[in-house]
Image: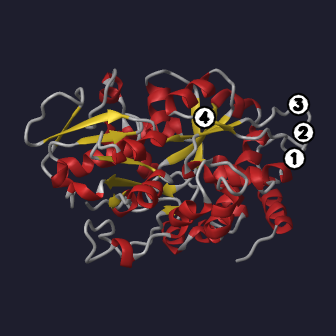
Amino acid sequence: MKMNRRSFLRGVGGVLAGAALPSPLLARVGEPELRIGYLPITDATPLLVAHANGYFADEGLKVARPVLIRSWSALVEAFLTGKVNCVHMLLPIPVWMRFNRRARVKVLAWNHTNGSAVTVAQRSGIRGFADLAGRQIAVPFWYSMHNVILQMGLRAAGLRPVIRPQNAPLAAREVNLFILPPPEMPAALAARKIDGFVVAEPFNALAEEKIGARILRFTGDIWQNHPCCVVVMDESLIRRRPAFAQKVVNGLVRAQLWASRNPGATARLLGRDGKGYLPVRRRVLERVFSGYELSRYGPGVVPQAIRHPDWPVRRIGFQPYPYPSATRFIVRELKQTVMEGDRAFLGRLDPDRAAAELVDDRFVKRAVTAAGGLGQFGPVFAESGWQREEVIDL
């Protein structure tokens, strides 16, 4: 189903006509400016595409150019202090914010699926998770999908993740984890300061291109079409300005459809040699958006990064609906994930309660329906509908 600007907007208007939202919906009087914060990673793609292609403007929103922020902690701080009012965050971060910090944060949609990998040095001899014993592995944030999925792989291999100084001795079955900002990871790997890292794109692709690093596993080959970054806003803003929230989500859904159908154009748009949203060249981004080839990563390749070639996944994918089953799963996994800081709240957190309180899916359901349904994002989503079972296989 091909959808142009006019038909998309007409469809959204039809769906929203009967919604319990202020009327007239498209009035801009008193609406806030949309201020987007993002990290320089492809997780931010839908927000950046919606800005670049004018989808937010088509919704009648006043939108500032997205602000690039270098670390997750700085992005959280910018959001909590109101410097930005719409951001992408790794799904575990708003879990921590809402149920530990008591921040009134709400997840409105998934921003993308998959889009991350475990990357190791070519010289390391690492062929699987078991070979990470005694190694130094960087993660971007403790409350990250990366840390959770990495530790799932370590436990399955009989290894024990620990958090110690890098010069501390390790037992035979231990793997040391520590935080490193994503832009620093490829250089640290090249300098032999670390043995590997797990992170979002484009830093896996950049390490492949620049230093000959190898992908150990794509995270989407471990957890099929898993959420990574989600779009969040302040709950009070959503309550006061539901029309504003709906317009943001409309633009986001439209951008996800465009990015999924135009991978090459997305790489050209976002790159340093395009609109300049991301600090890498188009060639690296083309590997991210199009590079999931069995000949490069499948059977017969060492290490074998793709072990489930029958799974309907992409290196990075786009599907906006926040499946409750995925939120419940990540909460359960966080309970057994090694992290620094106060994590006592996780012991008291019920996964069903977390999914119900953290996510507001009203707006994305309307936008997806207006766009033609979940099937627009692929047959696997059409089959699952609004409920699915999570598929994990290490």
- The reply to whether the C-beta atoms of the residues labelled 2 and 1 are less than 8 Å apart is yes
Could you tell me which residue is drawn at 57 percent across and 40 percent down?
39
Judging by the rendered image, the residue that carries numbered circle 3 is 30
Image quadrant containing the C terminus? bottom left
* Amino acid at circle 2: Arg
Q: How crowded is mark 4: few (under 14 residues within 10 Å), some or many (20 or more)?
A: some
Q: How far apart are marks 1 and 4 (CA)?
A: 26 Å
Q: Select label 4 or label 3 by which is in front.
A: 4
Judging by the rendered image, the residue that carries numbered circle 1 is 60
Q: Distance between the residues labelled 4 and 3?
A: 28 Å
Q: In which quarter of the image is residue 244?
A: top right
Horizontal arrangement in the rendering, residue 193 relative to residue 14 (left or right): left
Q: Residues within 10 Å of mark 1 (few under 14, many from 20)?
A: some
Q: Which of 354 and 73 is in front in this view?
A: 73
Q: Distance between the residues labelled 2 and 4?
A: 28 Å
Could you tell me which residue is drawn at 76 percent across and 71 percent down?
3
* Amino acid at circle 1: Gly
Q: Position of residue 130 (x, y in %)?
A: 16, 54
- The reply to whether the C-beta atoms of the residues labelled 3 and 1 are less than 8 Å apart is no
Judging by the rendered image, the residue that carries numbered circle 4 is 69
Residue 275 visible in the shown view: yes
Q: Distance between the residues labelled 2 and 1?
A: 7 Å
* Amino acid at circle 3: Gly
The secondary element bearing badge 1 is classed as loop
User: Mark 3 or mark 1, which has the lower sequence index?
Assistant: 3
Judging by the rendered image, the residue that carries numbered circle 2 is 28
